[in-house]
Amino acid sequence: MIVLDLEFNQAFDFGDHERGSEVDPKCRFEIIQIGAVKTDELYNVTDSFNILIKPIIYPRIHPYVEKITGFTGKDFYGAPNFPEAYAKFRKFVDGDLVLGTWGYSDIKALYRNITYHRLTEDPVIIKYVDIQQIATKYIGFSKGGAIGLKNAVEALNITIDEDKHFHNASGDAYYTARILRKICPDKPLIRIFNSKHIK
């Protein structure tokens, strides 16, 4: 399985009317980082992937995104555009057609970005496993909604590595895979994202 995590940028009005101050309805959340790990049958991490992506829809980093990720505009100097980065990610995936994600939002954002850049034709069908839902049920989280990634890591007594940061796609993919390894479902429910269902 490929465990995937994404970081996004979005519109923000900096007051100078430059590009990126208004929401583009075709792509509300622009992917600026892809992090992923490859796992074996027992969900042990066997390989990793991490790439920053130059934002072009919303060129300046939203202040909140900058705050939680630590990324600034300088981090994206020389970074590839989304089509180049996505091609590298597809090469890393290498035929593994099931993605493990923390919730559903990354799958929907991935669809929006690949269709915005016309990298595929509709309908888009993606097989994925919602690891957040599995972990929420396993932990018995009862505060309403689904458990957050960091809270799940702490609840499962998973060691936090100094070089793996939350709100970083690479770090979050790593921790999501660690959670999957810890709860180790024999046959996780594979869900189907079908873009025909999006209106």
Image: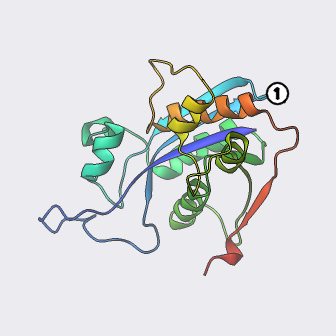
What is the count of numbered marks? 1
- In this view, the residue in front, 92 or 7, is 7
- In this view, the residue in front, 13 or 183, is 183
Q: Residue at x 52, y 52 (%)?
A: 83
Is residue 35 visible to the viewer in this orientation of the structure? no
Q: Within 10 Å of the Cα at label 1, are there few (<14), some (14-19), or many (20+) other Cα atoms?
A: few
Q: Mark 1: which amino acid?
A: Leu
- In this view, the residue in front, 1 or 52, is 1
Q: As drawn, which residue projects farthest toward the front?
A: 142
Q: In this view, does 13 lie above or below 71?
A: below
Q: Residue at x 58, y 37 (%)?
A: 152
Instruction: Name the spot of residue 165 as percent of width and height, x first.
Output: 44, 29
Q: Name the residue under label 1.
A: 42
Q: As drawn, which residue projects farthest toward the right?
A: 186
Instruction: Name the spot of residue 196 as percent of width and height, x first.
Output: 70, 76
* Among the 4 quarters of the image, the one containing residue 180: top right
Q: As drawn, which residue projects farthest toward the bottom?
A: 199
Q: In this view, does 169 lie above or below 106?
A: above
- Along the horizontal axis of the image, is 106 left or right of 38? left
Is residue 102 visible to the viewer in this orientation of the structure? yes
Q: Residue at x 76, y 38 (%)?
A: 1
- In this view, the residue in front, 118 or 42, is 42
